[in-house]
Amino acid sequence: RKEVEQDPGPFNVPEGATVAFNCTYSNSASQSFFWYRQDCRKEPKLLMSVYSSGNEDGRFTAQLNRASQYISLLIRDSKLSDSATYLCVVIGNQFYFGTGTSLTVIP
Amino acid sequence: EAEVAQSPRYKITEKSQAVAFWCDPISGHATLYWYRQILGQGPELLVQFQDESVVDDSQLPKDRFSAERLKGVDSTLKIQPAELGDSAMYLCASSILAVDTQYFGPGTRLTVL
Protein backbone atom coordinates (compact mmCIF):
# COMPACT_ATOMS: atom_id res chain seq x y z
CA ARG A 1 0.00 0.00 0.00
CA LYS A 2 1.32 3.43 -0.91
CA GLU A 3 2.12 5.86 1.88
CA VAL A 4 0.04 8.59 0.23
CA GLU A 5 -2.72 8.19 -2.33
CA GLN A 6 -4.45 10.82 -4.41
CA ASP A 7 -7.06 10.71 -7.13
CA PRO A 8 -5.05 11.78 -10.21
CA GLY A 9 -8.09 13.28 -11.89
CA PRO A 10 -8.14 15.10 -14.19
CA PHE A 11 -10.67 17.50 -12.78
CA ASN A 12 -12.11 19.84 -15.41
CA VAL A 13 -14.30 22.53 -13.86
CA PRO A 14 -15.82 25.81 -15.09
CA GLU A 15 -14.65 29.15 -13.77
CA GLY A 16 -16.34 30.00 -10.50
CA ALA A 17 -16.90 26.39 -9.50
CA THR A 18 -15.93 24.88 -6.17
CA VAL A 19 -13.68 21.82 -6.32
CA ALA A 20 -12.30 19.55 -3.63
CA PHE A 21 -9.40 17.10 -3.59
CA ASN A 22 -8.69 14.40 -1.04
CA CYS A 23 -5.53 12.63 -0.14
CA THR A 24 -5.30 9.56 2.12
CA TYR A 25 -2.25 8.46 4.06
CA SER A 26 -1.36 5.12 5.62
CA ASN A 27 0.90 6.03 8.56
CA SER A 28 -1.20 7.08 11.52
CA ALA A 29 1.91 8.56 13.17
CA SER A 30 2.39 11.11 10.38
CA GLN A 31 3.26 14.48 11.80
CA SER A 32 2.90 17.22 9.22
CA PHE A 33 0.84 17.77 6.13
CA PHE A 34 1.08 20.17 3.19
CA TRP A 35 -0.45 20.97 -0.15
CA TYR A 36 1.89 21.93 -2.96
CA ARG A 37 1.01 23.31 -6.37
CA GLN A 38 2.97 22.32 -9.47
CA ASP A 39 2.57 24.02 -12.83
CA CYS A 40 3.44 22.12 -15.98
CA ARG A 41 7.19 21.45 -16.19
CA LYS A 42 7.87 23.62 -13.14
CA GLU A 43 8.93 22.82 -9.60
CA PRO A 44 6.41 22.22 -6.80
CA LYS A 45 5.64 25.29 -4.71
CA LEU A 46 4.10 25.34 -1.27
CA LEU A 47 0.43 26.23 -1.36
CA MET A 48 -0.43 25.80 2.29
CA SER A 49 0.21 23.79 5.41
CA VAL A 50 -2.58 21.68 6.86
CA TYR A 51 -3.38 21.93 10.55
CA SER A 52 -5.62 19.81 12.72
CA SER A 53 -7.92 22.76 13.22
CA GLY A 54 -8.10 23.39 9.49
CA ASN A 55 -6.84 26.51 7.82
CA GLU A 56 -8.03 28.93 5.20
CA ASP A 57 -6.16 31.22 2.83
CA GLY A 58 -8.48 33.26 0.66
CA ARG A 59 -10.31 30.88 -1.64
CA PHE A 60 -8.37 27.86 -0.40
CA THR A 61 -9.27 25.75 2.63
CA ALA A 62 -7.25 22.78 3.87
CA GLN A 63 -8.44 20.27 6.43
CA LEU A 64 -7.02 17.27 8.23
CA ASN A 65 -9.02 14.28 9.43
CA ARG A 66 -6.72 12.19 11.60
CA ALA A 67 -9.38 9.61 12.45
CA SER A 68 -9.92 8.75 8.79
CA GLN A 69 -6.35 9.58 7.80
CA TYR A 70 -6.99 12.01 5.00
CA ILE A 71 -6.38 15.62 4.14
CA SER A 72 -8.45 17.74 1.83
CA LEU A 73 -8.12 20.89 -0.22
CA LEU A 74 -11.14 22.98 -1.18
CA ILE A 75 -10.92 25.68 -3.84
CA ARG A 76 -13.82 28.09 -4.07
CA ASP A 77 -14.62 30.41 -7.00
CA SER A 78 -12.08 28.69 -9.27
CA LYS A 79 -9.97 30.91 -11.50
CA LEU A 80 -8.26 30.03 -14.76
CA SER A 81 -4.95 30.56 -12.98
CA ASP A 82 -5.78 27.74 -10.56
CA SER A 83 -5.13 25.22 -13.36
CA ALA A 84 -2.22 23.10 -12.13
CA THR A 85 -1.39 19.83 -10.43
CA TYR A 86 -1.96 19.75 -6.69
CA LEU A 87 0.31 17.50 -4.66
CA CYS A 88 -0.37 16.45 -1.11
CA VAL A 89 2.61 15.86 1.13
CA VAL A 90 2.69 13.83 4.32
CA ILE A 91 5.63 13.73 6.70
CA GLY A 92 5.99 10.44 8.54
CA ASN A 93 9.52 9.15 8.81
CA GLN A 94 10.22 10.99 5.59
CA PHE A 95 8.55 13.34 3.12
CA TYR A 96 5.96 11.48 1.03
CA PHE A 97 4.39 13.06 -2.02
CA GLY A 98 1.13 12.00 -3.58
CA THR A 99 1.03 11.50 -7.32
CA GLY A 100 -0.83 14.77 -7.76
CA THR A 101 -4.32 15.75 -8.88
CA SER A 102 -4.62 17.61 -12.16
CA LEU A 103 -7.03 20.54 -12.25
CA THR A 104 -8.08 22.44 -15.35
CA VAL A 105 -10.38 25.43 -14.95
CA ILE A 106 -12.33 26.06 -18.12
CA PRO A 107 -13.53 29.53 -19.23
CA GLU B 1 13.51 36.16 -1.96
CA ALA B 2 16.10 33.41 -1.47
CA GLU B 3 15.86 30.50 -3.89
CA VAL B 4 17.30 27.06 -4.43
CA ALA B 5 19.62 27.10 -7.43
CA GLN B 6 20.11 24.14 -9.75
CA SER B 7 22.18 23.58 -12.85
CA PRO B 8 22.03 22.67 -15.58
CA ARG B 9 18.35 23.25 -16.30
CA TYR B 10 18.37 20.77 -19.16
CA LYS B 11 20.70 17.89 -19.98
CA ILE B 12 20.62 15.53 -22.93
CA THR B 13 22.99 12.61 -22.83
CA GLU B 14 23.45 9.22 -24.38
CA LYS B 15 23.03 6.05 -22.39
CA SER B 16 26.16 4.81 -20.65
CA GLN B 17 27.47 8.37 -20.27
CA ALA B 18 28.03 10.07 -16.94
CA VAL B 19 25.96 13.08 -15.86
CA ALA B 20 26.14 15.38 -12.86
CA PHE B 21 23.68 17.83 -11.39
CA TRP B 22 24.42 20.63 -8.97
CA CYS B 23 22.27 22.21 -6.28
CA ASP B 24 22.82 25.22 -4.03
CA PRO B 25 20.21 25.37 -1.26
CA ILE B 26 18.82 28.41 0.45
CA SER B 27 21.43 29.82 2.80
CA GLY B 28 21.04 28.45 6.32
CA HIS B 29 19.02 25.42 5.28
CA ALA B 30 20.61 22.40 6.91
CA THR B 31 18.48 19.80 5.16
CA LEU B 32 18.86 19.11 1.45
CA TYR B 33 16.90 16.66 -0.68
CA TRP B 34 17.25 15.21 -4.15
CA TYR B 35 14.09 13.96 -5.83
CA ARG B 36 13.34 12.31 -9.13
CA GLN B 37 10.03 13.06 -10.79
CA ILE B 38 8.75 11.11 -13.76
CA LEU B 39 6.06 12.82 -15.84
CA GLY B 40 2.63 12.23 -14.34
CA GLN B 41 3.96 11.10 -10.98
CA GLY B 42 4.82 12.76 -7.71
CA PRO B 43 8.43 13.43 -6.71
CA GLU B 44 10.28 10.40 -5.35
CA LEU B 45 12.93 10.99 -2.70
CA LEU B 46 16.39 9.79 -3.74
CA VAL B 47 18.55 11.12 -0.92
CA GLN B 48 18.28 13.40 2.10
CA PHE B 49 21.21 15.21 3.72
CA GLN B 50 21.41 16.80 7.13
CA ASP B 51 24.37 19.14 6.82
CA GLU B 52 27.03 16.94 5.19
CA SER B 53 25.62 13.62 6.38
CA VAL B 54 23.29 11.32 4.48
CA VAL B 55 20.13 10.76 6.50
CA ASP B 56 18.20 8.65 4.01
CA ASP B 57 19.37 7.15 0.73
CA SER B 58 17.21 4.04 0.81
CA GLN B 59 15.67 4.81 -2.60
CA LEU B 60 18.93 5.79 -4.30
CA PRO B 61 20.07 3.22 -6.91
CA LYS B 62 23.56 3.03 -5.50
CA ASP B 63 24.98 0.94 -8.32
CA ARG B 64 24.80 3.99 -10.59
CA PHE B 65 23.79 7.01 -8.51
CA SER B 66 25.91 8.90 -6.02
CA ALA B 67 25.36 12.09 -4.08
CA GLU B 68 27.56 14.24 -1.94
CA ARG B 69 27.39 17.40 0.11
CA LEU B 70 30.98 17.69 1.23
CA LYS B 71 30.87 20.99 3.08
CA GLY B 72 27.24 20.82 4.08
CA VAL B 73 26.23 23.54 1.65
CA ASP B 74 25.91 22.74 -2.06
CA SER B 75 25.43 19.23 -3.37
CA THR B 76 26.11 17.14 -6.46
CA LEU B 77 24.10 14.19 -7.76
CA LYS B 78 25.84 11.93 -10.25
CA ILE B 79 24.61 9.16 -12.50
CA GLN B 80 27.12 6.79 -14.07
CA PRO B 81 26.27 5.17 -16.40
CA ALA B 82 23.00 6.79 -17.42
CA GLU B 83 20.21 4.52 -18.61
CA LEU B 84 17.14 5.26 -20.74
CA GLY B 85 14.90 4.89 -17.69
CA ASP B 86 16.72 7.72 -15.91
CA SER B 87 15.00 10.30 -18.11
CA ALA B 88 13.10 12.47 -15.64
CA MET B 89 13.12 15.78 -13.79
CA TYR B 90 15.65 15.88 -10.96
CA LEU B 91 14.56 18.26 -8.24
CA CYS B 92 16.57 19.62 -5.37
CA ALA B 93 14.87 21.01 -2.28
CA SER B 94 15.99 22.42 1.03
CA SER B 95 14.50 23.13 4.41
CA ILE B 96 15.64 24.61 7.70
CA LEU B 97 14.78 21.45 9.59
CA ALA B 98 13.83 17.99 8.38
CA VAL B 99 10.12 18.38 9.14
CA ASP B 100 9.85 21.92 7.82
CA THR B 101 8.45 23.22 4.58
CA GLN B 102 10.63 22.28 1.63
CA TYR B 103 11.55 24.81 -1.03
CA PHE B 104 12.32 23.48 -4.47
CA GLY B 105 14.75 24.54 -7.13
CA PRO B 106 13.69 24.74 -10.80
CA GLY B 107 14.94 21.22 -11.49
CA THR B 108 17.15 19.61 -14.09
CA ARG B 109 15.32 17.90 -16.90
CA LEU B 110 17.36 14.90 -18.03
CA THR B 111 16.83 13.13 -21.32
CA VAL B 112 18.79 9.95 -21.97
CA LEU B 113 18.93 8.88 -25.62
Image (spheres, coloured by chain):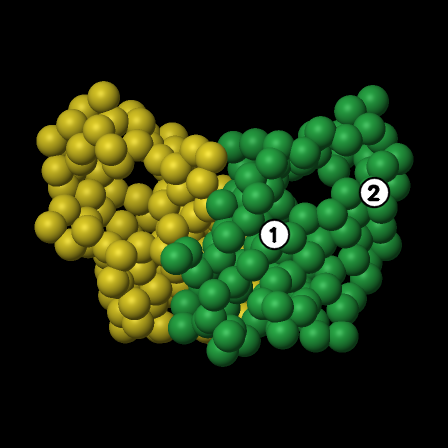
Chain colours: A green, B yellow
Left or right of A14 in this view: B33: left
Q: Residues within 10 Å of mark 1 (few under 14, many from 20)?
A: many
Which residue is label 1 attached to? A36
Q: Where in the figure is residue B71, as x and y percent of width and height?
A: 29, 68
| Chain of the residue displaying label 1 | A
Quarter location, residue B12: top left
Q: Are marks 1 and 2 in contact (CB under 8 Å)?
A: no
What separation in Å lies between label 1 and label 2 (alpha carbons)?
Answer: 18 Å
- What amino acid is found at the position of numbered circle 2 in the picture? Thr
Residue that appears at 47% across and 35% down = B40
Residue B110 percent location from the top left of the image? 33, 32
**Discs 1, 2: same chain:** yes
Q: Identity of the amino acid at label 1?
A: Tyr
Question: Residue drawn at (47%, 70%), measured in percent from left and top?
Answer: A27
Left or right: residue B84 compared with residue A45: left
User: SS class of the residue under badge 1?
Assistant: strand
Q: Which residue is mark 2?
A: A18
Q: Give left or right: position of B12 versus A58.
A: left
The reply to whether residue A5 is visible in this rendering is: yes
- Say which quarter of the image contains residue B32: bottom left
Name the image quarter holding the N terminus of chain A: bottom left
User: In this rendering, does residue B107 appear at all?
Assistant: no
Q: Dot 2 falls on which chain?
A: A
Helix or strand or loop: what does disc 2 sit on? loop
